[in-house]
Image (cartoon, rainbow, N blue to C red):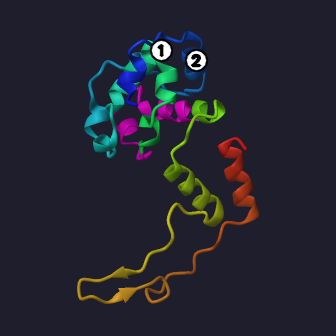
Amino acid sequence: MTLTDLMTMAKSNEELQKKIRNQLWNTHPDECYQCMRCTSGCTSLKLLELKPHEITILVNAGFIEELVSSDIIWTCTSCLKCRERCPQKASPYNTIMALRNLAVEQEAKIPEKYMKVVAQILETGMAEQAQIVTSKDMQSFNREKLGLPEIQQADDKFKAIFMKILGG
């Protein structure tokens, strides 16, 4: 179901809107004047049903439940380009993170791929395993062959901090 379908009969939820705003640290989505600089720099734009500036519009309008129920908030790659580019400190990044937190709190369906990345980080401390690379002359290189140090596995201290950040 698309976000547009979810919004067809929706009404603004002021209580959830207030909850999201309380989590937005130094971000002011109500000051967004739709310059679309966040959208023009978005690395996930092709994956998004909505554009980042439109997410800000929907939060300002109170359509929190619809956003939390959609996959849109999970496609953000957290590159922070929107934050760099926003002249008003109204970047959608913190809003998307607050929406994700609310989705987890409400036990909404979280995409399986996202959960796999979180599990990988918890297990190894990295979003991806170290890769073997191939040069243009078809030679394969691993970390050892390149003289790079061995990657340390995530220790208990890292796991505890990571779980605290996740709210667990």
Residue 62 circle label: 1
Q: Position of residue 23 (x, y in %)?
A: 59, 26
Q: Please name the residue shown 70% across and 49% down the image.
A: 163
Residue 29: image quadrant is: top left
Residue 78 in magenta stretch: yes
Q: Please name the residue shown 27% across and 88% down the image.
A: 138
Task: Give the mark count.
Answer: 2
Above or below: residue 91 compared with residue 16: below
Q: Which residue is mark 2?
A: 16
Left or right position of 112 against 47: right
Q: Please name the residue shown 55% across and 31% down the image.
A: 98
- Residue 42 visible (yes or no): no
Q: Regarding mark 2 in the picture, which secondary structure is present there?
A: helix
Among numbered discs 1 and 2, the one appearing first in the sequence: 2
Above or below: residue 92 compared with residue 157: above
The N terminus - image quarter: top left
Q: CA distance from mark 1 to mark 2?
A: 8 Å
Task: Name the amino acid type tagged 2.
Answer: Leu
The answer to whether the residues at label 1 and label 2 have Cβ atoms under 8 Å apart is yes
Residue 168: image quadrant is: top right
Segment colored magenta: 77-100
Q: Regarding mark 1 in the picture, which secondary structure is present there?
A: loop
